[in-house]
Amino acid sequence: MQKIVVAVGGSSGAIYAKVLFDKLVMLDTQVEAVGVVMSDNAKFNWQYELGNQDYGKYPFDFYEKKDFMAPFASGSAKFKTMIACPCSMGLMGRIASGVSDNLTTRAADVILKERRKLILVVRDTPFSLIHINNMKTITEAGGIICPASPSFYSKPKNFEDLAATVVDRVLDLAGFDLTSFRWGD
């Protein structure tokens, strides 16, 4: 059973967050708690890109970005993994710099200082040297950069299947036991 933090950043790619939420619901026997923080832009992009506000219908604990009383704002709550999906370059830069000015960046700071698993699903292209250096900094601090680069060898049939090629990889990295396309199977 895992306690997991999901931060939904403000970059385009709400489909990745939706598919991640859907998969976490299906993995409920492996999940003790899911704490979610969504930026204002994340909520806007969800509505703009997906045409709804269904993020509020998921059975997770949602926290406001300034709620430093959220359990995962402290290492003692023992949240094992944090996934930022999608993760904007701005969010990644604040995490790399150690800026803890909101709940998302504080949670990432806690995860890194406790030597737990931080996975950033970056969703931007191309990368500038600043982005690459921030990725290097986060990787050296123990984080994992997992670009939202879908694969096609599983022959995805729609956008959700395509997004699942990334989300399944993220959930593998987070240590969940799930059934997904495996090369060579």
Image (cartoon, rainbow, N blue to C red):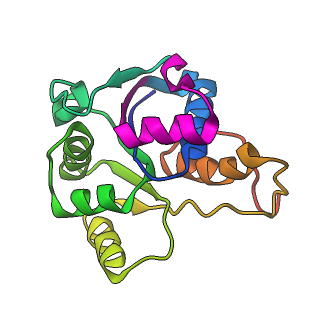
Above or below residue 141? Residue 159 is above
Horizontal placement of 169 versus 131: left or right? right
Looking at the image, how many numbered discs can be counted on the residues?
0
Pinpoint residue 64: horizontal percent, then vertical percent.
27, 27
Measuring 56% from the left and 22% from the top, which residue is drawn there?
Answer: 29
Instruction: Give left or right: position of 109 versus 135.
Output: left
Judged left or right of residue 133, residue 54 is: right
Q: Is residue 111 above or below residue 46?
A: below
- Is residue 185 shown left or right of residue 37? right
The residue located at (24%, 52%) in the rendering is 112
User: Does residue 177 appear in the picture of this structure?
Assistant: no
The answer to whether residue 42 is magenta is yes
Residue drawn at (17%, 31%) of the image: 76
The magenta stretch spans residue 112 = no
The image position of residue 154, as x and y in percent, is 81, 57
> Residue 99: horizontal and vertical position, in percent?
15, 54
**Residue 82 appears in view:** yes
Residue positioned 54% across, 25% down in the render: 53
Q: Which residues are magenta?
A: 33-58
In the image shown, does 118 or 68 lie closer to the viewer? 68
Which image quadrant is residue 69 in?
A: top left
Q: Quadrant of residue 71?
A: top left
Check the image and name the residue furthest to the bottom: 129
Q: Quadrant of the C terminus?
A: bottom right
Image location of residue 10, percent across then percent down: 41, 48
Judge whether 130 appears above or below 170 on screen.
below
